[in-house]
Image (cartoon, rainbow, N blue to C red):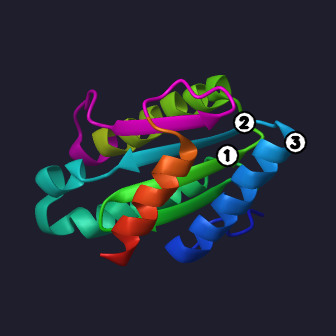
């Protein structure tokens, strides 16, 4: 049985900050992925909110219990992967994108290609344009608007 790893954005930001400080102190990996679900607005119209919720639950059921998830705004799903390198997060992001694409293809009854927009950051091997701290600052700002 999976423990509920979905948290409110304020709780998520607090826990993410704690995990980032732990990673910095002990030099362990931590990765963050942001999935943009806004594409559902165009594809599903008025049914987009229900689809987003379904995709969030699908994502939640396909990550570890120790990973944290939160919805920011109407269309962003943010996932924090403690003790996960960038390479591990890249594998996970590809797997999650494929799971989401497959589910959307099933609903639409035709193959859907490359509609999932993901952003990623990792510590200490930051290979992305933004650091995890920058992502967390931006998410905090968006959650207040």
Element type at marker 2? loop
| Residue 114 drawn in magenta | yes
Q: Quadrant of the C terminus?
A: bottom left
Using the rendered image of the protein, determine whether residue 127 is visible from the camera's viewpoint: yes
Within 10 Å of disc 3 (Cα), the crowding (few <14, some 14-19, many 20+) is few
Instruction: Point out which mark residue 81 bears.
Output: 1
| Residue 67 drawn in magenta | no
Using the rendered image of the protein, determine whether residue 55 is visible from the camera's viewpoint: no
Residues at circles 3 and 2 in contact by the CB criterion of under 8 Å:
no
Q: Position of residue 60 (x, y in %)?
A: 58, 56
Foreground: 110 or 76?
Answer: 76
Please give left or right for residue 80 compared with residue 37 in the image.
right
Q: Quadrant of the N terminus?
A: bottom right
Marks 3/2: CA–CA distance? 14 Å
Give the residues drawn in magenta, as a range. 106-129
Instruction: Point out which mark residue 84 bears.
Output: 2
Relative to residue 18, is residue 108 depicted above or below?
A: above
Which marked residue is nearer to the observer: mark 1 or mark 3? 3
Q: Position of residue 103 (x, y in %)?
A: 38, 44
Please give left or right for residue 143 compared with residue 47 in the image.
right
Which marked residue is nearer to the observer: mark 3 or mark 2? 3
Element type at marker 1? strand
Foreground: 101 or 24?
Answer: 24
Q: Earlier in the sequence, mark 3 or mark 2?
A: 3
List the residue tagged with mark 3.
Answer: 26
Residues at circles 2 and 1 in contact by the CB criterion of under 8 Å:
yes
Residue at (52% x, 34% y) in the render: 93
Foreground: 21 or 102?
Answer: 21
Marks 1/3: CA–CA distance? 16 Å
Q: Position of residue 108 (x, y in %)?
A: 22, 44
Residue at (78% x, 45% y) in the render: 23
Q: Position of residue 9 (x, y in %)?
A: 51, 71
């Amino acid at each position: 049985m999976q423990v509920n790893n979905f948290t409110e954005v304020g709780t998520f930001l607090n826990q993410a900050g704690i995990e980032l400080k732990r990673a910095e102190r002990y030099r362990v990996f931590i990765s963050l992925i942001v999935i943009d679900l806004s594409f559902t607005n165009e594809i599903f119209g008025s049914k987009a909110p229900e689809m987003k919720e379904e995709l969030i639950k699908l994502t939640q059921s396909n990550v570890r219990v120790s990973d944290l998830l939160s919805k920011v705004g109407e269309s962003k799903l943010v996932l924090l992967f403690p003790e996960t390198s960038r390479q591990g997060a890249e594998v996970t992001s590809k797997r999650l994108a494929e799971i989401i694409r497959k589910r959307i293809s099933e609903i639409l009854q035709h193959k859907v290609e490359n509609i999932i927009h993901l952003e990623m950051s990792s510590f200490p091997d930051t290979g992305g344009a933004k650091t995890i701290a920058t992502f967390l600052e931006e998410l905090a700002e968006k959650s207040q608007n």
